[in-house]
Amino acid sequence: MSILVIEEAAEAEDWARHLRAALPHTEVLVWPELPDPDAVEMAVVWDDLDALAGLPNLRAVVVLGAGVDHLLGRLDAMPEGVACLRIVDDSVRAQMVEWVLLALVTHTRRWDDYREQQRAGSYEELPVPVPPDLVVGILGFGVLGRATGELLRDVGYRVRGWSRSAKRAEGIECFAGDGELGAFLSGCDVVVCMLPLTAQTEGLLRRDTFAMMKRGAYLINVARGGHVVEADLVAAIDEGRLSGATLDVQREEPMPAGHPFWSHPRIRITPHVATYTLARFCAAQVADNYRRLQSGEPLHNRVDLHRQY
Ligand code: NAP
Ligand code: GLV
């Protein structure tokens, strides 16, 4: 029985090397090497699903990321009855909390203003809030949202989280469901989007939800570009409703030439780099799930494709 890695060449070899080290008695193949399609029980992929149709005994597909929204339009290519697994890993959590903290303090500590002052030879203090002055709201209080919320709480921010089902977290104010979205947003100085992109969350950050936020609130989006109606965001910032945004993700990646985010003075972008799913850390959980598949134990990190996350 074997595992098939379907990824770009260098990454695929890296995954195969780490999986072979973790599972020395299992054959690990790199697509398109496929001597016996009947032997493949697990496929490891990001977005190239075309090969899956030729694997009659496939039992699990591991998607090499936290989000699976890119698969939702390709469900025809996901064989019926095959388990879909995603990556949940401390290395990803660490990168995510680091990126969000950086985005937050770059804004609150006015880092860009200090760099400009430095260039101008100016040595002036600028007024800034301190963490307990600020309410930071996390949209999507799941694996990554909770880890981020707990870190920000420990730093000293006042933190709230919003999720679909009710949650509890020490020292964090939890909100749930569409009915509590307005109350959640209205108290936030900074809103951090960490939701999965689904039919329910697509375009959630738009004119009417910006209108629910405090005047001057700041937006950080580290989830998916599809959560934001981009023209509404630019308008909300230009009208002063929002004070600005930091966006790791955009609707079209890379953004096309002339996109307003390239040059907007109050929008910072990074090119979808908040986290990397690295084989040297994450292969162990893929190997563990493969062993579970063999022994009939429950698999970890299953995605419910009907729920869309
Ligand atoms: P997760 O564990 O599945 O958490 C998702 C959270 O969103 C859960 O709390 C869920 O509520 C909530 N949610 C889902 N639909 C909702 C709705 N309609 N209304 C309110 N809350 C809703 O996901 P995760 O691992 O934290 O990852 C979150 C997302 O981050 C990923 O899907 C991906 O898009 C993004 N991401 C981006 C990067 C990057 O590099 N920029 C890296 C990794 C991940 P329940 O708890 O009630 O289910
Ligand atoms: C990256 O964006 C991921 O979903 O892992």
Image (cartoon, rainbow, N blue to C red):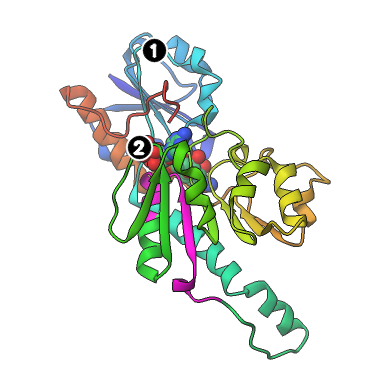
Type of amino acid at the residue the image marks with label 2: Ser
Answer with the quarter of the image where residue 106 lies.
bottom right
Query: Any atom of ligand 2 within 8 Å of the CB at mark 1?
Result: no
Residue plotted at (58% across, 33% down): 202
Residue plotted at (38% across, 34% down): 86
Magenta segment boundaries in residue numbering: 129-147
How far across and down, in percent of the image, does residue 137 sit?
47, 55
How far across and down, in percent of the image, does residue 162 sit?
43, 46
Q: Is residue 156 above or below residue 175?
A: below
How far across and down, in percent of the image, does residue 171 sit?
31, 61
Residue labelled with disc 2: 165
Q: Is residue 169 above or below residue 305?
A: below
Say which quadrant the C terminus sits in. top left
Secondary structure under tag 1 reads helix
Residue 76 seen: yes
Q: Is residue 144 magenta?
A: yes
Disc sitting over residue 299 in the figure: none
